[in-house]
Amino acid sequence: MGLGASRVLDYLVTEPILREVPLAVVGHSRDGKTAFWCGAQDGRVAFVVSNDSGTTGAALARGNTVERIKDINTRFPHWFARN
């Protein structure tokens, strides 16, 4: 989504009706994480809506009450490249 959202923004900024409109990216769960990343990397993003982004998103990655990075890698290995 991060790179894909930036490509969509490439088009949206060419539309005259949208030139002065703040643009947002929205994502849920894993896409919530990538929405954060897109907002951090692309200066054209005025705001980010990240719903339930969990570990490595808006949640803390430390402590006893949250999902740890080890947990997310163990339960969702298909989200990540082997390297």
Image (spheres, grey):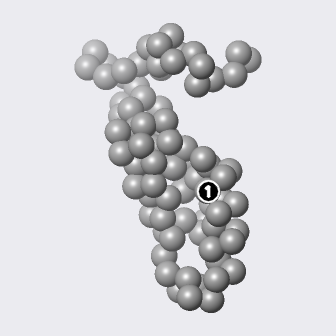
Residue 70 seen in the figure: no
The residue identified by callout 1 is: 5
Which residue occupies the foreground of this view, 20 or 17?
17
Going by the image, does 10 lie left or right of 21?
A: right
Q: Secondary structure at mark 1?
A: helix
Closer to us: 63 or 4: 4
Q: Compared to 54, does 31 lie above or below?
A: below
Considering depth in this image, is 57 or 81 the residue closer to the camera? 81
> Which quadrant is home to the C terminus?
top right
Residue 26 vertical placement versus 44 (above, below): above
**Left or right position of 17 against 51:** right
Quadrant in the rendering for residue 44 = bottom right
Q: Position of residue 2 (x, y in %)?
A: 62, 49
The extreme bottom residue here reads 16
On screen, residue 69 versus residue 12, left or right, reads left
At horizontal 47% and vertical 13% (from top left) the residue drawn is: 75
Determine if residue 65 is in view.
yes
CA neighbours of label 1 inside 10 A, class few (<14), some (14 to 19), many (20+): some
